[in-house]
Each structure stands twice: as structure tokens, then as C-alpha cells.
Image (tube, rainbow, N blue to C red):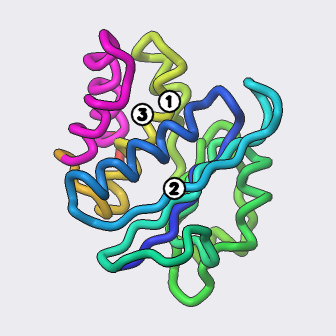
Amino acid sequence: MHQEIVFTGFGGQGIILAGYICGKAASIYENLYATLTQSYGPESRGGASSAQLIISDKPIYYPHISKIDVLVALSPEGYQQYKNKINGDSKPVIIVEKDFVSLDTADKNSAFVYPIPATKLAEELGKRMVANIVVLGFFTAVTKIISRKSMQQAIKESVPAGSEELNFKAFEKGFFYA
């Protein structure tokens, strides 16, 4: 098993945290190997942001992605930036923020595409800022790369104290939306 995953969006959407939680769940609770590289613009909010994650059952000797197996795009710019690195050797998974990202027709036909209104679902919980956790729930249910239990444990240990209940609700909302 070797999965190259990119979470991308705007700064302030929790993209880096989503990648961190996913990698933590894989490496600590699934006993897999994981590497995480991150990129973000100089702005603290609104600039481009990405978390590039490799998860494998074998040691990872090169930490940068070459062909994306799963692209999670919460912004149109992020989608445009990474769509050309999507793995053409297999049918990849593309998860997009339904209300922000429009896919190219070619990608709709060559990938498993899963749109989710993550921001809207997070707003239903009263906090737009948990859209990244909604997406993690959705990602977990759709890809099955990491178990639900492992992801929940990593969320519990990674979110600020006192926000665990809200984040669990956000995760479940995304999981069951899938």
C-alpha cells in the first residue's frame, strides 16, 4: 500500500492540521509509515496552503509526492495547482469543496470524484472553522485508507483542549455525509 495524498486550500481552512491528523492516524494508530510536507503562502489567511502526505506500509525514502492518488481540494486555486500531478496510472480520488471548486470535464471522467459542501456542513454545527474536520470524516469514509477509530483518536489528540466534542461532531457529520 502506497498512497500519495494532497490536501490543498486557502490558509485559514486548517489544511495543514488536516494533513497532520491524517499522518498521525496512519503512523501512530495504523502502524504505517507516513511523511508530511507542507506549503503555505506568506499570508496567515487567504493564501495558498497545502499538506502533502505519503502513507505506505513500507519505509518512505523520498518525502515528496510524484503522482497524487488522492487530491482533497478546498479551493479552486489548489485544485488547479495540483490537478496535473494526479496519478494517471490508476483512477485517483478527488474530493472537492462542492461550493468552491469546479472540476474540469476530463478529471470528472478519469477519477472518482466526491464533492462535499464541507463549509456549509461546518456552519450547521455553528463553527465554519471545523470544515477541515468535516472533510477528514468524509475522506475517511470514502478512501478507507485509515480507519474511523484511528482518525478519531488522532483528532482527539490534535485539536485544542475543549474543542474535542465539536470536532468529533464535525468528523461524524462528514463521515455520514459520505
Kindly check if marks 1 and 3 are in contact, taking CB atoms under 8 A apart as contact: yes
Considering every residue shown, the one lying at the far front of the view is 61
| Between marks 2 and 1 in the image, the one whose residue lies nearer the viewer | 2
Structural crowding at the residue carrying mark 2, measured as other residues with C-alpha within 10 Å and reported as few (<14), some (14–19) or many (≥20): many
Kindly check if marks 3 and 2 are in contact, taking CB atoms under 8 A apart as contact: no
- In the image, residue 141 sits, relative to residue 167, either above or below, namely below
Percent x, y of residue 4: 51, 69
- In the image, residue 161 sits, relative to residue 147, either above or below, namely above
Structural crowding at the residue carrying mark 1, measured as other residues with C-alpha within 10 Å and reported as few (<14), some (14–19) or many (≥20): many
Percent x, y of residue 102: 72, 51
Question: In this orientation, does residue 7 appear?
Answer: yes
Residue 10 horizontal side relative to residue 153, left or right: right
Provide the secondary structure element on which disc 2 rests: strand
Please tell me in which quadrant of the rendered image residue 15 appears: top right
- The disc, 3 or 2, on the residue closer to the chain's N-terminal end is 2
Provide the secondary structure element on which disc 3 rests: helix
- The disc, 2 or 1, on the residue closer to the chain's N-terminal end is 2
**Screen quadrant of the N terminus:** bottom left
Q: Which residue is mark 3?
A: 133
Q: Which residue is mark 1?
A: 131
Percent x, y of residue 22: 39, 49
Which residue corresponds to the image point at 65% horizontal and 37% vertical from the top-left? 99
Q: Which residue is mark 2?
A: 36
Amino acid type at image mark 2 = Leu
Q: Which mark is residue 54?
A: none
- In the image, residue 71 sits, relative to residue 16, either above or below, namely below
Amino acid type at image mark 3 = Ile
Read off the magenta span.
Answer: 150-176
Amino acid type at image mark 1 = Ala
Which residue corresponds to the image point at 70% horizontal and 42% vertical from the top-left? 49
